Amino acid sequence: MWHLLFQTFTYLQIVDLGLSNGIIRELAAAKEKDSKYFSDTVATAIRAFTFVGVAFTGLGGITCFLLPCFIDLPLMLRKDFLIALILFSCWGFFRYRYAVNFFSLYAVDKVDIFNALNLLLGPGRPVMGMLFLTLKLGLSGIAVGYILVEAIVRAIALKIQKLPVTSGCYDHKQFIKMFVFGGATSIVSLSSLFIFFSSSFIIGWRIGVVKVAVYQSSIALLFLIHKFAIVPFSNLLPEFIRYYETGNISMLKKKGLYSHSIVMLVVFTSSMLAALINKLFITLWVGEEFFAGYHFTAVYSVFIFLYTARHNGYMMFQAIGYLKPMLICHLVQILIILCLSVFLVDKFGLTGIAYSYLLSSLPVIIISQLIFIRIPKKRNK
C-alpha cells in the first residue's frame, strides 16, 4: 500500500511539466550573463514554481476521489491511505514554492552540496517515515516523515543558497523558454514514470496487489544501482551546458564520451554483481517469497544497464538544448510500454513486465547514443 501511495505522489509530479529541467538549464546558462539577467531568471523561476505548486495541490485533491474508483484499496487501510495522500497534496504547494534555491545549487556549481542534500533525502525520508510508523500512525505517519525530511532539505537550501529574490522581475520570454524546454523534458519524464512506476498499477490491476510487493522487492537493489550510477554524469550537466553555450563543442564531446565510458563500465560490473546476489539480498531483507526469480532479474539487469546509457545520452541532449529526437522516441515508447505491459504480464507474469520495459526502451536507447558520435554546432538564436 505504501508503494502505491508513494508512486501516486510521484505521478502527481507530472504537473511540473518539466519546469525543473527548464529552470536548471536557464539558471546554468544565466550564470554566464549579467547579474540583471540572472536575477530575472530567479524571479521567473519562483513565479513558475508557485503556479506548479498550486496545480499540484489541486490535482492531488482530485486524485483522492478518483483513485479508489480504479484500485480496490483494502477497507482497513483506505482511510489512512487517503489521509496520507491529502498530506502529500497539501505539501505539494510548499514543495515547489521553495524549490528554486534547492535546484539552483545544481545549476550554479554547488553540485557537491546538492548531492549531499539528495543523499539526505534518499535514506532520510524512509528512516524518518519508519520512526513515525513506530508511533502507530500508519501510512499517514510515513507520509509525515517524508514531508518533514523534504522540508528540512529545502530549509537548508534556503539558508545556504542566497539568491537575488527581490531584485529580479518576472520575464515572460524567459518563462516561455523554460516552459518549451521543460515541456519537452516532461514528455521524457512521463515516459520514465511509466518505465519505473506504472508497473505497480498494472500489476495490481492484472495480477493482484500482493505481487506489487514482490516486484518492488525484486527491483530494489538493481534500481538503487541505476540511481547511483546516473549521479556522476548528471553532475556534469551544468558544465556541459556552459561548454555548449560558449561554443566549446570539442571539449563537450571529449569529456562527455570519456565520462560516459567510465560510468557504463562501472554500472555493467555493478549490475552483474547485483543480479548474482539479488536473491540473497531479498531473502535477508524481506524473505525469499518476495524474489521474482532469476529470469526476471537477468532481464531487468540488462534493462538497467541500457537505461543508464540512455540517461547519459539524454543529459547530453539537454546540454545542447535539442530534445526533438528523444521526445519523438519517448512519445512512441509510452504507447508501446502500455500495450506490452498489459499483454505480457497476462502471459508471463512479472517477467513479462521486465521484457516489456526492455523491448519498449530499445529505440530511445539507440537514439540516445548518437549524440556521443556527433554533436551539432551551437545554433544562432
Image: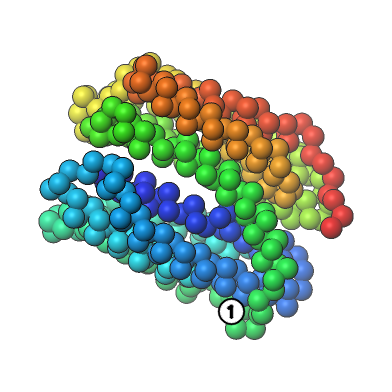
Determine whether 335 is above or below 62 in the image: above
> Which residue is situated farthest in the bottom direction here?
167
Q: Where in the figure is residue 345, as x and y percent of width and height?
A: 37, 23
Tell me the residue at 47%/31% (across/down): 338
Determine whether 47 is above or below 107 in the image: below
Q: Kindly tell me whether residue 28 is visible in this rendering.
A: no
Determine whether 221 is above or below 24 in the image: above
Q: Which residue is mark 1?
A: 165
Quadrant location, the N terminus: top left
Q: Kindly tell me whether residue 11 is visible in this rendering.
A: yes
**From the viewer's perspective, is 289 left or right of 349?**
left
Q: Where in the figure is residue 259, as x and y percent of width and height?
A: 65, 38
Q: How many marks?
A: 1
**From the viewer's perspective, is 303 left or right of 151?**
right
Q: Quadrant of residue 223?
A: top left
| Element assignment for label 1 | loop
Q: Where in the figure is residue 47, as x and y percent of width and height?
A: 57, 73
Residue sitting nearer the eye, 127 or 344: 344
Colour scheme in the image? rainbow
Tell me the residue at 61%/78% (across/down): 164
Residue sitting nearer the eye, 69 or 1: 69
Tell me the residue at 84%/58% (across/down): 381
Q: The residue under label 1 is which amino acid type?
A: Val
Q: Quadrant of residue 233?
A: top right
**From the viewer's perspective, is 280 left or right of 369?**
left
How many C-alpha atoms fall within 10 Å of the one at disc 1: few (<14), some, or many (≥20)? Answer: some
